[in-house]
Amino acid sequence: MRARRNRAFTLVEILIVVVILGILAAVVIPQFVNASDEAQVGNVETQLRTLRTQVQLFRAQSDTNDFPALVEGEDDGAVAWAAMIDEQLLQAAPVNPRTNSSTLTFTEETGVAGMDEAMADGDVGWFFNEETGELWAASFNENYRDPDDEDTGEPWPAGDE
C-alpha cells in the first residue's frame, strides 16, 4: 500500500508569509494615515480659491467697487455670508473643514500677518479684511508647501493634531 502523504504548509513557510505581509503593511499603511489630512487641505485650498474669486466677482459687479459687507461673529454662517448668498455668488455659508465652522472674523492685518493671525485661531472659520478683500482660512497655513516658509510642516493651530 502506498503511504498517504499529507499536504500542508510547514511552520517555516507560514512564518515567511507572515513576515512578508508585515513588511507590506509597514510600507502601505503610512500612506493611508495622512490621506484624510491631505484631503482636508485640498478642500480648504479649493474653498479659498473659490471664495476669493467670488469676493472679487462681488466687487466687480458692485456699482461702488466695494468688497462685500460681511457680518462678523455670527454663529449662523448664513447671516455672516448673506451679502454673497443674496447675490447668488454662494449657495450656502462655506464651512472651514479645519475648524468645522463658517463663522467670520474681521482683521485689520494684510498679507502674511493676516495669514499668521488666521493660522493661530481655531475657533472661527474664516478671516476677512474688508479694506483689501483678503480672505484666509482659520487654522490653515497656505504656505505649507513652500520650503522657504518657516512654518512648513507645522500643524495649525500650533500643537494640535
Image (cartoon, rainbow, N blue to C red):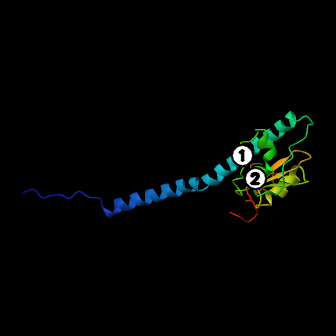
Q: Is residue 143 visible?
A: no
**What is the crowding at mark 1: few (fewer than 14 residues within 10 Å), some, or many (at least 20)?**
some
Q: Disc 1 residue type? A: Ala
Percent x, y of residue 111: 88, 49
Image quarter of the C terminus: bottom right
Tell me the tag on residue 92. 1
Percent x, y of residue 29: 54, 56
Percent x, y of residue 115: 83, 53
Q: Secondary structure at mark 2?
A: helix
Q: Nearer the viewer, residue 102 or 10?
A: 102
Q: Nearer the viewer, residue 51 or 19?
A: 51
Mark closer to the chain start, 2 or 1:
2
Residue contact between numbered discs 2 and 1, judged by CB atoms under 8 Å? yes
Q: Nearer the viewer, residue 151 or 127?
A: 127
Question: Which residue is label 2 attached to?
Answer: 77
The residue at 90%/53% (across/down) is 109
Q: Disc 2 residue type? A: Gly
Q: Quadrant of residue 21?
A: bottom left
Q: Is 62 situated above or below 43?
A: above
